[in-house]
Image: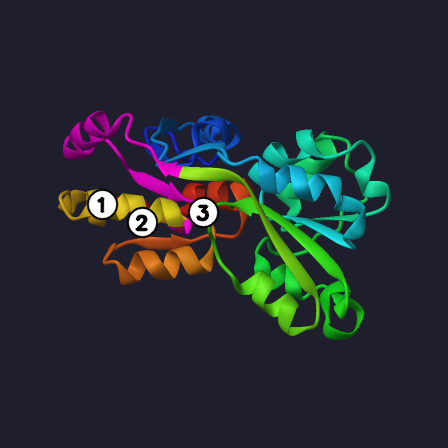
């Protein structure tokens, strides 16, 4: 293996939505590999704009505005009033979302120093029971998702409102070509960054035994556990974000 180009000769499948796949794909190419884009999800604005408009008009009432992902920032921010974050504390679920907020001019964002999920956010001292009791919180997110964050904050005495700002749909484009390339043995590994992408991948896995034998790199322990439980033979849990995925891909001993 070339130490400088550990992915030389390898083709890695990137399953993120196309607009979010660029940095990971570039990282794979920088390590000598080929990135095969196969988005399992398509992201689009939430069809009902009324909840966002209502929350935007009342944003000063909230102590915290939590953005559950970079997509939440992307789809919510254009509708929010100028300088809203001067009165309401912006909160990101992780560093990637914080960067998306900063790129839009939202600075002094609160986010976990380690991790990028509800558990990491809930561990912040600002969200412990005493300081959060009686506070109003708005959570900008996609349609559906885990309920742990809101449930825990409510249990700690906060008033929480969800505002859906985008929706996720299964992406059908490119499936035939993907299946053909998979059957030909072209792919060396596949990356997963969300549980929903895994669910859509499972729609294919039942018909493609070769897929279950392909190494799966997951950037979250929960996703890795679900992939193992679903019967994927080689599941590698990496540290978070693109850097974690790239480090795991580069260190793996491919057959």
Span highlighted in magenta in the image: 169-195
Q: Nearer the viewer, residue 173 or 253?
A: 173
> Could you say where residue 76 lies in the image, as x and y percent from the top left?
63, 36
State the colouring used for the structure image: rainbow
Q: Image height check: is 125 above or below 179?
A: below
Residue at 15% across, 43% down: 208
Q: Are marks 1 and 2 in contact (CB under 8 Å)?
A: yes
Residue at numbered disc 3: 248
Which image quarter: residue 207?
A: top left
Which of the labelled discs sits on residue 171, or is there none? none
Q: Residue at x 76, y 52 (%)?
A: 62
Q: Residues within 10 Å of mark 2 (few under 14, many from 20)?
A: some
- Of badges 3 and 1, the one in the foreground is 1
Viewer-side label of 3, 2: 2
Q: Nearer the viewer, residue 96 or 64?
A: 64
Residue 203's mark? Answer: 1
**Which residue position holds label 2?**
199
**Where the N terminus falls, by quadrant?**
top left
Assess whether mark 2 and mark 3 are in contact (beta carbons under 8 angstroms): no
For residue 102, above or below residue 131: above
Q: Earlier in the sequence, mark 3 or mark 1?
A: 1
The secondary element bearing badge 2 is classed as helix
């Amino acid at each position: 293996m070339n130490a400088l180009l550990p992915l030389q000769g390898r083709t890695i499948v990137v399953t993120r939505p196309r607009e979010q796949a660029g940095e990971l794909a570039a990282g794979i190419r920088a390590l000598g590999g080929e990135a095969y884009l196969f988005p399992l999800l398509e992201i689009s604005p939430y069809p009902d704009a009324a909840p966002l408009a209502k929350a935007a008009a009342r944003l000063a009432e909230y102590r915290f505005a939590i953005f559950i992902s970079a997509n939440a920032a992307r789809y919510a921010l254009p509708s929010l009033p100028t300088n809203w974050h001067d009165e309401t504390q912006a909160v990101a679920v992780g560093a990637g979302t914080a960067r998306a907020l900063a790129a839009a001019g939202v600075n002094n964002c609160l986010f976990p120093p380690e991790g990028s999920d509800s558990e990491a956010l809930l561990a912040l001292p600002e969200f412990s029971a005493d300081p959060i009791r009686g506070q109003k919180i708005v959570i900008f997110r996609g349609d559906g998702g885990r309920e742990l964050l809101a449930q825990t904050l409510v249990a700690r005495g906060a008033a929480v409102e969800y505002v859906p700002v985008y929706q996720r749909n299964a992406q059908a484009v490119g499936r035939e070509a993907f299946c053909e390339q998979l059957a030909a043995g072209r792919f060396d590994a596949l990356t997963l960054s969300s549980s929903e992408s895994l669910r859509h991948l499972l729609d294919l896995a039942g018909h493609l035994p070769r897929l279950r034998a392909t190494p799966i790199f997951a950037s979250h322990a929960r996703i890795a556990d679900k992939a193992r439980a679903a019967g994927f033979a080689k599941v590698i849990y990496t540290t978070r974000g693109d850097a974690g995925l790239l480090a795991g891909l580069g260190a793996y001993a491919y057959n």
